[in-house]
Image (spheres, rainbow, N blue to C red):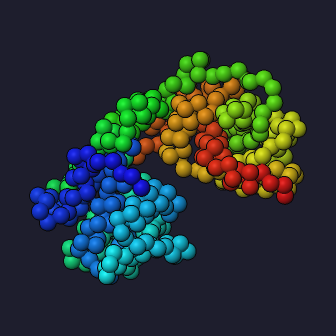
Amino acid sequence: MNLRPFSKKQTLSLTWWYPSSPYSNYDAVICDGAIRSGKTICLTLSFILWSFYRFNGAAFAICGKTIRSLRRNVITPILPILSDMGFECSQKISENIVYIKNGIHKNIFYLFGGKDESSASLIQGMTLSGAFFDEVALMPHSFVEQALARCSVSESKFWFNCNPECPQHWFYKEWILSRKKKNAFYIHFQMKDNPALTEETIKRYERLYTGSFYQRFIEGKWTATEGLIYPNMTDENAFVSVPEGPFDRYAVSCDYGIINPTSCGLWGEKENIWYRIDEYYYDSKAEHDTRTDEEHFNALQKMINGRNINCITVDPSASSFITLIRRKSNYIVKPARNNVIEGIREVSTALKKGEIKICKNCKAAIREFSLYRWEQGGNKDMPVKENDHAMDEIRYFVNTILATDEDDFFALAAKR
């Protein structure tokens, strides 16, 4: 694998722990800032090199939001680099363990996913010589604290990597703002700190984000969200006419409600773009009448109108509606992935990249785009829980169907 010469900040993240470094007395390193700035690969390599410089036969933790994201973002990129440097690497995938050997030295690295509060129990009882946290701002406080408590070996150190979130975030307040108290070395990255990125590539990334996401991902600031969640979707030119002719495949996304509105979107793919070509939206409060699961299913069938639907993704809490769809049809139904903040980011990116387009006849979705806002105050990003049913359903589509690669998608679409 070819690596370009490192930038000044990348070199600093690689070497801060070395005995001759003026920063070697720190107990932790924190690298935050813009996306694609090269901080992850440099910090991971630095962590592995430090572990072999200080220890032999020791155990370490490498932590990510999920095991899947950790393998994709950290393990898969770093192993070929280590192999090129003369390290011997092997994995026990079923146990989430990576063994790394360099000559007579061998260390073991346990992989952990810190996706929710229950994850803290996974790491209890271990004795570690150090821990690395990829995207630490996406992990619960309890999981990180439990992992840190396991690092009881003398000379153990902590390694943190993240993109910025809101300024009330626990990690920003407890570690970045209190880094002197924590004895942590802080390095802030920008895109220009990654020599592998061309000016054209940086400008392309700059075009993908707006508002607070631009400030966080491009400028690398811990900034509060405010105002509309999708500000670019208030312009009537953001919406398109339904394309003519057949589509390559179809899918449906559903946000189910009894008292709250039910929103379903019909999606058609043409030339690698997914269009939301029709919708079913029923607000029982506005209509002064509730509908049964059966009535919602009949309306869904009417919207589908005999099209060959590859997959329907539904609000995961709507178990009765999911059961009814499966019982009364041959549709493949998949409970939606329901991570709100990551989903909003993915929808924002998909809209900016033109991977999804909303058609002008989707009046309920257009109305909600103009009203969907961030909550003000509080200690974390959350949208206001109103005017959000089409927004949730569009997020389900992006999180669950658009994010699925082609092999997985067609596996879902197989005949039962």
Instruction: Give the image quarter of residue 274.
Output: top right
Percent from the top left, x then y, of residue 319?
72, 56
- Whether residue 225 sits left or right of residue 342 in the image: it is left
Asked if 197 appears above or below 62 in the picture, the reply is above
Percent from the top left, x then y, of residue 307?
85, 38
Asked if 304 appears above or below 77 in the picture, the reply is above
Asked if 360 appears above or below 258 in the picture, the reply is above
Identify the residue at horizontal 84%, vertical 58% (top origin). 416
Q: Residue 115, can we see it?
A: no
- State how many labels appear: 0
- Whether residue 214 sits left or right of residue 308 in the image: it is left
Identify the residue at horizontal 74%, vertical 47% (top origin). 312
Q: Residue 10, can we see it?
A: yes
Asked if 38 appears above or below 218 in the picture, the reply is below
Percent from the top left, x then y, of residue 218?
37, 36
Percent from the top left, x then y, of residue 203?
41, 29
Q: Nearer the viewer, residue 107 or 206?
A: 107
Identify the residue at horizontal 86%, vertical 52% (top origin). 330
Image quadrant occupied by the N terminus: bottom left
Identify the residue at horizontal 35%, vertical 65% (top origin). 85
- Whether residue 16 sits left or right of residue 106 in the image: it is left
